[in-house]
Image (tube, rainbow, N blue to C red):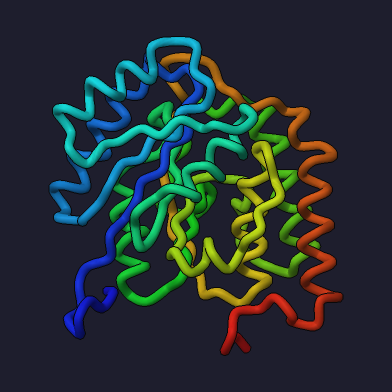
Amino acid sequence: MTEHAGVPRPLMLTVLIPAHNEGGSIVPTVRAIEGVLQGAQIPHEILVSLDHCTDDTEAIITALAVQVPSLRGSVNPGPGGYGFAVRHGLDVYAGDAVVVVMADASDDPRDIVTYYRKLEEGFDCAFGSRFLEGAAVRNYPWNKLVMNRIANWVVRVLFGEKYNDFTNAFKAYRREVIDGCRPLLANHFNLTIELPLKAIVRGYSWVVVPTNWYGREAGESKFLIKEMGSRYVYIILYALIEKYFSRGDYRRLGAS
């Protein structure tokens, strides 16, 4: 809850969807999210960060917004790329909290409700794991799965955390966490680990829940395995330096 004129009000949630040429999948993704959040009576907006689309994604969003009042699109004016698109969305979103959702319907909208309830309980962040009991993973390419598990194991060891799905973009944060993690440095998919690592290192509270993941059925994945290289190492090293050498200069006030 947030407080307005002394009266608590429900958290307003922004569902942030970065989208580059997702005309084939964006409509069912938006409609599924809208239906679930309406059913759960969660105040929300659905914000699509349009990332230099050369297909009809922008036109589709404009037309769909007439039918879905909670939906709006915003064009990323900066360089193209996943990280830039998400960062643009984080500059213009309206909610008290934000959840990053992929445009290809790979994330289960019902898990957004689970995240929201955890934020309502008072957690600053809600992280999903596709590799916990109760989670479901379908159609995950084996080569990407192997790289995923290796990368997450390395991060777990380096940071001494039991959480096993840092690289999953699908996470929720209160606005104060996003503001407290600035400036954001990652321009590409390495933003998926910058946000949770900074939130953890800077002392924000977090909870992990099992989440479902389904391989895309339309369009092409924008993720490249080579992204698991130097750009990820850069962010991991940055967060490690902050964790062990910053003497808590960037920690949330009041965090132990």
Q: Residue at x 81, y 59 (%)?
A: 238
Give me the residue at 22% from left, 41% from top: 70
Point out residue 141 in the picture as x, y percentages from the top left corner: 60, 25
How many numbered dots are placed on residues in this image?
A: 0
Q: Quadrant of the N terminus?
A: bottom left
On the image, the x and y values in percent for residue 27 come to 29, 23
Q: Quadrant of residue 140?
A: top right
Q: Residue at x 68, y 40 (%)?
A: 187
Picture residue at 29% right of the left edge, 32% below the top: 30
> Which residue is the extreme one toward the front?
77
> Relative to 6, is 254 on the left or the right?
right
Instruction: Say which of 256 and 13 sits in front.
Output: 13
Quarter of the C terminus within the rendering:
bottom right
- From what the image shows, is residue 56 above or below residue 137? above
| Whether residue 49 is situated above or below residue 9 in the rendered picture | above
x and y percentages locating residue 210 in the rendered image = 44, 54
Name of the residue lying farthest toward the top: 55
Placement of 113 over or under 83, stated as above or below: below
Horizontal arrangement in the rendering, residue 185 relative to residue 231 (left or right): left
Image coords of residue 17 (percent x, y): 42, 37
